[in-house]
């Protein structure tokens, strides 16, 4: 991934913050840096087994406007921890601690390995993942993914999600490893 694409990843992370009090970082461990180093198709491991919480695997494909797989698209994901926090309360940074970048392979595939996030402590929003997708010559997408069965998803939230392709309610399944698992393909529009 070239510097321009890496800069776009940072911009996506900033633009995708939505209701979240987060900001991009610019250090060597930033998502842009991770994208520059990520091998296409390699799983982005946001956190390992030492992180408290139930394991979650999220994978899918990035597709172009014609439904064709899009290679070398950057997929950025970030989310709260098992306590619903992006960072510890005394943290000096607002960059989400649990974040990663995956680069799609020749079949447009990406994969994240992480934990299932918890809702914010004030329960103002269902538990969610933020996912941003960037690819040359395509409009970026900024998605928020909720999880079916979350008690914070009520009629009002379902109404918000209906007809909004950037608000996804994913159905989780337990994989053989015991991890929650879901797949979601993300289609981009050309620009
Ligand atoms: Fe959020």
Image (cartoon, helix red, strand yellow):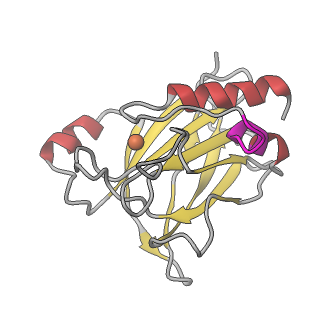
Above-or-below relation of 32 to 128: above
Quarter occupied by residue 76 = top right
Quarter holding the N terminus is top right
Left or right position of 103 against 81 = right
At 84% from the left edge and 46% from the top edge, which residue is drawn?
37
Residue 91's place in the image compared with 21, above or below, is below
User: Where on the picture, by quarter, is residue 7?
Assistant: top right
Q: Does the magenta stretch include residue 128?
A: no
What residue appears at the point 71 percent right and 60 percent down from the top-left corner? Answer: 43
From the viewer's perspective, tell me whether residue 107 is left or right of residue 114.
right
Q: How many labels does the image show?
A: 0
The structure residue drawn at horizontal position 20% and vertical position 38%, both measured from the top left corner, is: 159
- Residue 136, position as x, y percentages in the image: 74, 25
Instruction: Verify whether residue 31 appears in magenta.
Output: yes
Q: Which of 31 and 144 is in front in this view?
A: 31
Q: In this picture, is 111 found above or below 173?
A: above
User: Which residue: 80% across, 49% down?
Assistant: 38
Left or right of 27 on screen, residue 22:
left
| Image quadrant where one finds the C terminus | top right
Q: What stretch is highlighted in magenta?
A: 27-34
* Residue 48 at x, y percent in the picture: 63, 70
- Name the side, left or right, on which 168 lies relative to 23: left
Dividing the image into four quarters, tell me where ligand 1 lies.
top left
């Amino acid at each position: 991934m070239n510097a321009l694409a890496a800069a776009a990843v940072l911009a996506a992370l900033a633009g995708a913050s939505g209701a979240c009090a987060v900001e991009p970082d610019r250090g060597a461990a930033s998502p842009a840096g991770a994208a520059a180093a990520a091998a296409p198709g390699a799983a982005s491991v946001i956190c390992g087994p030492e992180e408290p919480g139930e394991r979650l695997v999220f994978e899918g494909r990035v597709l172009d406007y014609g439904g064709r797989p899009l290679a070398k698209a950057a997929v950025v994901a970030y989310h709260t921890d098992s306590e619903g926090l992006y960072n510890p309360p005394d943290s000096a940074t607002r960059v989400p601690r649990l974040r990663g970048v995956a680069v799609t392979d020749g079949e447009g595939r990406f994969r994240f390995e992480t934990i299932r996030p918890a809702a914010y402590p004030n329960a103002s929003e269902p538990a969610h993942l933020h996912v941003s997708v960037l690819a040359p010559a395509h409009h970026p997408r900024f998605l928020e993914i909720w999880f079916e069965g979350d008690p914070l998803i009520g009629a009002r939230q379902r109404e918000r999600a209906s007809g909004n392709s950037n608000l996804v309610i994913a159905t989780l399944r337990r994989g053989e490893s015991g991890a929650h698992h879901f797949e979601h393909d993300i289609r981009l529009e050309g620009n």
